[in-house]
Image (cartoon, helix red, strand yellow):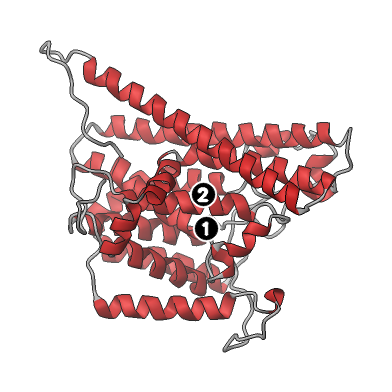
Amino acid sequence: MGASPSHAATPHRRDHRIDALRGVALLMMCIDHIPQDVLNRFTMRNVGFADAAEVFVLLAGYASWLAYGRAFGKKQPVLSVLARIGRRCWQLYVFQMAMVVVCISTIRIWRHFWPVPVDFLEPELAHGLDSAWRVLSLQALPGNLNILPLYIVLLLGFAPLYALLRGVGTPVVLGLSAAVWLLVNLDPRLNFPNWLDPDGWYFDPLAWQFLFILGVCGARLAGRHDGSLPRSRVLAAACGLYLVFSFVQSFPWMDWGFADLRPVSMAVPDKMILAPWRLLDVLALFYLVQSSPGATALAATRGGQLMALFGRHSLEIFTAGTLVDLYARLVLTSFGAGWIMQVVVNVVGFMVLLWVARNRERARAVARARRAASPAPGGLPVHAPLCRN
């Protein structure tokens, strides 16, 4: 998916708005998982009801349509598309297990040299490996390692979702999805079981499926309008006003030494069940980005292209970011969170993510060059498309 020089995305170019927004969300997720990091004062969670996790899941739905929904629509063999979905789910699972193993082993080794609070891992995982089978079966989801299992569940449901969209239509599917989300908000006990948390999965799939499906439907709608959501001044103004309210209501005024300017008194919207305030927040932000020519221009800048580089390799960057989180928390906990350590941790962490992103980009370019040079059945080389999603 891509963007034209003005506003709309053409079918032959990748839309860098999506990649750039996903890259920003990945960096914010990395920062947010380091409680001692001063940079997490400036992330989404301090300026709105939603945070980077909502952006990640919404864009997961959007990207899933681009990767698999369009393949179904182009009459590619169903089994071939299903196999691609299966391989992606398996890849997500392997990365999830790799992160669990690295995190548990790292903390166990670290404790031999420096004291680490038990809350770095749930006590059940910190003191024994009897629960390993629960982790392998996704019945036990450690903290900070709970979003990929959600993605796996949602992606496994993509093929039935596509069939429903073709069979009964978008309004019916959105209505059913919204009904399930609303039911969970009315009764938060409806959740998948989590051995480490009596409340269930931190990201309740029965609630978060609505955001994923909204991303899928957003991609379908944008595809009918050259890659951008239809622009409405009234809707854009409403989204802008809501985000202003969200900012004023969510900003940590007193933590910054300011007077409390929140207009209403309300509890923090529940993230587990994707409370309505959070849902509206991320949808307003996404609409403004994906319908704005200004966002297209911003994504084309050097900074936007850097964020898009991270966003194009979301799984690898998320995994590397999770490990950066772990080591950053260990370092800051064991050696202090002074300014020197803050600078070292953030600079090293960013350089690690940049190294991963550039290496993945080079590997992708090499793979494309090989595909382009490989002979087609008729003996002519197969030319790769300008961009693949």
Front residue of 188/219: it is 219
Q: Quadrant of the C terminus?
A: top left
**At 47% across and 53% down in the image, what residue appears?**
24
Which residue is at a point 45% across and 32% down the rendered structure image? Answer: 358
Q: Does 289 sit left or right of 387 as displayed?
A: right
Front in this rendered view, residue 123 or 300: 300
Instruction: Kindly state the secondary structure of the residue where label 1 is placed.
Output: helix
Q: Classify residue 41 by image quadrant.
A: bottom right
Residue 263: x, y in percent?
Answer: 57, 89
What residue does disc 1 label?
A: 52
Residue 191's spot in the image, x, y percent?
A: 59, 58
Q: Say which residue appears at 18% left-offset and 55% top-offset.
A: 226
Residue at mark 1 to residue at mark 2: CA–CA distance: 7 Å
Relative to residue 167, is residue 365 drawn left or right? right
Q: Amino acid at mark 1?
A: Ala
Q: Residue furthest front?
A: 340
Q: Is residue 24 found left or right of 333 in the rendered image?
A: left
Location of residue 46 by image quarter: bottom right
Q: Which residue is mark 2?
A: 26
Residue farthest bottom in this picture: 263
Q: Is residue 252 above or below residue 41?
A: below
